[in-house]
Image (tube, rainbow, N blue to C red):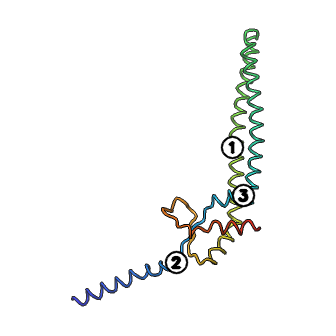
Amino acid sequence: MNLLRVTTICFLIIFLSGPIAIAANNKVGYINLQRLVNESKMGKSAREDILKLRREKEKAVAAKQEQINRLRNEINTKAASMSAAEKQDKVEALKKLYKDYQRMVADAKEDISREDRELVALILKKADGILKKVAKKKRFSIILKDPNAIGYLDPDVDITDLVLKELNKK
């Protein structure tokens, strides 16, 4: 009976220590995806394009806001001299302009957000092959991409600079 217990305990120790020994040979790395997007040549160029798009959208929104302000001022200053029907028409026109303005702002935000998502996806797609090559060359078994999953990061396992360097060559 004791021999069976000792054998079982030895088996469990050997069995459970196997994965620990295997895991010790694995090298885990990390890549900062936001840095890839912000610091790569491709990312900087695309950011400039997004900034240009944002400025264009802001100009259009500002022009619509100016139309609203002019009509509102006209209603406020000339209300006393307008007929009820004319005043009602102006108020309806103001409501329509404001609704168009709100739609324009929402569309502009969505357009900019979509462009940003497409930029990130494109850079990550191009960086993926480079990431795999660098990881193999440096003999990493696992590369983490989620900064929220990391409690501590040894700078030696951050391969962002290596991937950036290769990405910027292209």
Q: Position of residue 121 (x, y in %)?
A: 68, 59
Residue appearing at x 76%, y 51% in the figure: 48
Amino acid type, residue under disc 2 in the picture: Asn
Disc 3: which residue: 43
C-alpha separation, residue under disc 3 versus residue under disc 2:
32 Å
**Number of marks drawn:** 3
Q: Is residue 110 above or below residue 90?
A: below
| Label 1 vs 3, first from the N-terminus | 3
Disc 2: which residue: 26
C-alpha separation, residue under disc 1 versus residue under disc 3:
20 Å
Disc 1: which residue: 109
Amino acid type, residue under disc 1 in the picture: Lys
Q: Which quarter shows the N terminus? A: bottom left
Residue in the foreground of this view, choosing between 164 and 21: 164
Residue furthest front in the image:
155
Q: Position of residue 15 (x, y in %)?
A: 38, 83
Residue appearing at x 76%, y 68% in the figure: 169
